Image: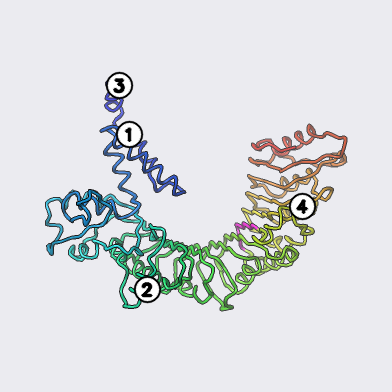
Amino acid sequence: MTYRRSICDILPDLIHDIVPYLNPEYCDTKEDTICARYVLLRCALTCRDFTTPALNVLWRSLPSDKPLVNLLSTLGVVQSLIAERGDLNGVAEYCSQDDPRTHPQWEHFKGRASQVHAITLDPFSTRPSVWTKLVPLLRGEPVLPALRRVVLGHQSTGLTFQYMEAELHYGHHVHGCGVLQLITPSVRHLSLLVRAMRRRSATLPVREVLREACTLAPDLESLYISSFIGVSLEALQNHRRLRTVDIEYNDVPDYGLEPLCELPHLESLSLVVNTASTVPLTMNYVRVLVLRGFLIDTEAFLDRVRLPQLRSLCIAAAEEHPAHLIQHSANTFRVLSNKYAHLTELRVEWRKSTAVQDRGPVPTLAGALCAVIEPLHELHELRDATLHFHGFCFAYSSSDIQSLAESWPSLETFHLEFVTLEQRRAGFESLLHFARNCPHLRALRLPTMELTKDAFDEIAYPKKPHPLRELNVARVTFPEGNDLSWEMIQLAQKVFPHAGSPVSV
């Protein structure tokens, strides 16, 4: 006990510096978030010196509005509807018509509420919401004045469809919409997560939820929508500060994206594309674009959209017909070279469609690499390039490596991945082309290469060692009966002495 006090006395700020690292906002998965909240709770209950810093972090990010409702109930501001069973589960009622700020315990609640920076709300809940009556009595004062991030989504296994349909029939909102009144103009980041439902009658409330949330948060900077149905984006037309929009649903037509064309600060756009329409779109300010879908659809989208400021492009696409990979890939890359020659970052991930993958893991022979990537040689400003062809097999040669190195002199990172063909691989010595032509290259990853004794006959080493930091070749093969491991290592160390990653043999 004495040792515990001495630590806290000597280093009083230590706890306050360590506990914030458990902030659930920093967690990537739901499981990690739950674990972080549990650890913070145990810290608060274990030691009085931990209580204040742990609770401060816990209150920064709330998994629902239940902690707020339960606190109001504990303080006597609202009455729990099931308090007689001793179960405070976030269902309460404000029974007075007076301003809740006149309650003697309101300042205590306000102190905790002002710490909330992020919260998850369920606007689709069928339970009554205490906020429907309480918030209007505050006369414009926000319940959560420091709120910056809001996630809207289901917190139950699903909706009561009969209830929802009855509400739609009579023109009412579901009770959960009352929680939307917790959204304040200080909110900058909004996420809408709509899980799969059995009926499409939920389209109307989803659209209304997004519209109301956007109205309550006029200064949004980022928006993320993950939905099993398409959601109208008309509510975004007046959000002039939006910089990032990420949309994950498959049935959004091109004309549904038109509201985004008017956003003057939209810099980053991520979406699933389809061929529902051929409406031409112009987005003058988008610099970062992320596309997901089938390869033929991404090609069509890039061909009909106009993005004059585009500098970074990421495409994760599936190919339904592996035999058409070369044609579709070459067409897509040709569109890039013709319309987006100023790209500085390109990330491409081609995969077989799920139906094709189910047939087995055998790689699909796609032909010669040069036939696919030749149009990319025109992207002379590329600094970061990633080309992953998962499950596809290509033949490639040292001349392909030379063409890439000579075409991309500003390259800083390059990752190339696919299944190679035996005796149809680039020579390991072709790495020298990167050393000669890409002085800024820092990370290089390549598929399987080969090395023969003849490769060392006429090697012209660069005059200066290259500053490459990471070199990773999937594998290097040698002629049968020859072990050139030592020569390979010497070549790599002589050309790239600072490379930290080993070359696999």
**Foreground mark, 2 or 1?**
2
Residue 159 vertical position relative to residue 61 in the rendered view, above or below: below
Callout 3: helix, strand or loop? helix
Q: Is residue 336 left or right of residue 180?
A: right
Q: Which mark identifies residue 165?
A: 2
Label for residue 15? 1
Give the distance between the C-alpha atoms of the residues marked 1 and 4, in whole angstroms. Answer: 55 Å
Under circle 2, the secondary element is: helix
Q: Are marks 2 and 4 in contact (CB under 8 Å)?
A: no
Give the amino acid type for the residue marked by disc 4 in the picture.
Answer: Gln
Say which quadrant the C terminus sits in.
top right
Q: Earlier in the sequence, mark 1 or mark 3?
A: 3
- Mark 2 vs mark 4: in front: 2
Q: Quadrant of residue 393?
A: bottom right
For the stretch drawn in magenta, the main secondary structure is: strand
Residue range of the region highlighted in magenta in the rendering: 342-349
**Tag 2: amino acid:** Glu
Residue 203 appears at what percent x and percent y? 43, 72
Give the mark, 2 or 4, whose residue is nearer the N terminus: 2
The CA span between labels 2 and 3 is: 62 Å
Quarter of the image holding residue 134?
A: bottom left
Mark 1 or mark 4: whose residue is earlier in sequence: 1
